Structures are given as C-alpha cells and as structure tokens.
Amino acid sequence: MRLFTGLLLVLIVSCSEKEITPAIAPPTWIQGSWVDETNTINYIFTPSNVVQSSFGISVDFSQINESDEVEVKQTISTGRYILTITGGGVTQSHKFAEVDGSHMNYSLIQGGVSISLLFTKK
C-alpha cells in the first residue's frame, strides 16, 4: 500500500494552473462512495470529480487535472471507467469495472506493475 500512496504522490508534487480540458466526468453507475475490502482505500465519485483517500492522504483528481505538468485522460464505456494520468515521466492507469450495482473491480497499473482490489459501494 505504501507503493500505491507513493505513486499517487509522485503525480501531485508539482501543480500549476491550466485550463481544464476535458473536465473529469465519471459515469453515473460509479458515482457515490466506495471502499475496498480492508476499509483502507476510499473513492468518492461525483458528477465532476474523483477523490481517493488512503492512510490519511486525499488525492483530488480535478486538482491534478489543473496541472500543466500532468495530463489526465478518461475513457468511459459500458460498465468501465479509466483514468490515465501522465506526469513526470510516469503513467498510471486507474481502471474501474462494474461487477454489479454494489461492487466494482479496481486496478492500478504503472510500469507493468498492477494492484487489483474489490470495492463495495457505501
């Protein structure tokens, strides 16, 4: 889990303002609060943002998207939502896949390393 938190911190170290294009817009099925199996990592999805919290650290993806040094792309398809974040020579893919109305699979992929977790909607 320290690797997970450290990877996210690498992407938010240097943030300066820019026009947000495109805005973060998670699909309806994922909106709400989600928690992993160990109650350690939480995601909150709103119509215009994603916030991830773990170990007392929160990462606001809309704020990351404002950085000139970081690019955030989103891919939306039926039952899938992917955020790809590139900055500082590092690319992370956050992949969310709907299992049913109250569960989703999550994968964080960076440099060939993958972490997968099951999340439950609160």
Image (cartoon, rainbow, N blue to C red):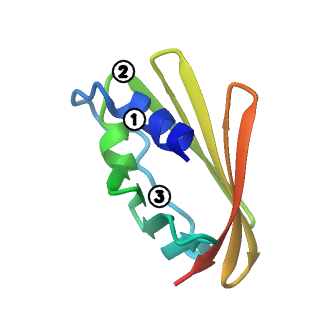
Mark 2 vs 3, N-terminal side: 3
Q: Check disc 1: other Cα within 10 Å, few if <14, some if 14-19, many if 20+.
A: some
For the view shown, which residue lies furthest in the top direction? 89
Q: Which residue is drawn at 57% across and 81% down?
A: 121
Describe the element under mark 1 as helix, strand or loop.
helix
> Which residue is the site of mark 1?
9
In x, y percent, where is residue 59? 37, 49
Mark 2 vs 1, N-terminal side: 1
> Which residue is the site of mark 3?
25
Do labels 2 and 1 touch, CB within 8 Å?
no
Describe the element under mark 3 as helix, strand or loop.
loop
Do labels 2 and 3 touch, CB within 8 Å?
no
Residue 33 vs residue 29, the one in the foreground: 33
CA distance for labels 2 and 1: 14 Å
Q: Is residue 28 left or right of residue 81?
A: left
Q: Check disc 2: other Cα within 10 Å, few if <14, some if 14-19, many if 20+.
A: some
CA distance for labels 3 and 1: 22 Å
Q: Which amino acid does label 2 sit on?
A: Glu
In x, y percent, where is residue 8? 46, 38
Do labels 3 and 1 touch, CB within 8 Å?
no
Q: What residue type is labelled 3?
A: Ala
Q: Nearer the viewer, mark 2 or mark 1?
A: 1
> Which residue is the site of mark 2?
69
Q: Which residue is drawn at 30% across and 44% down?
A: 63
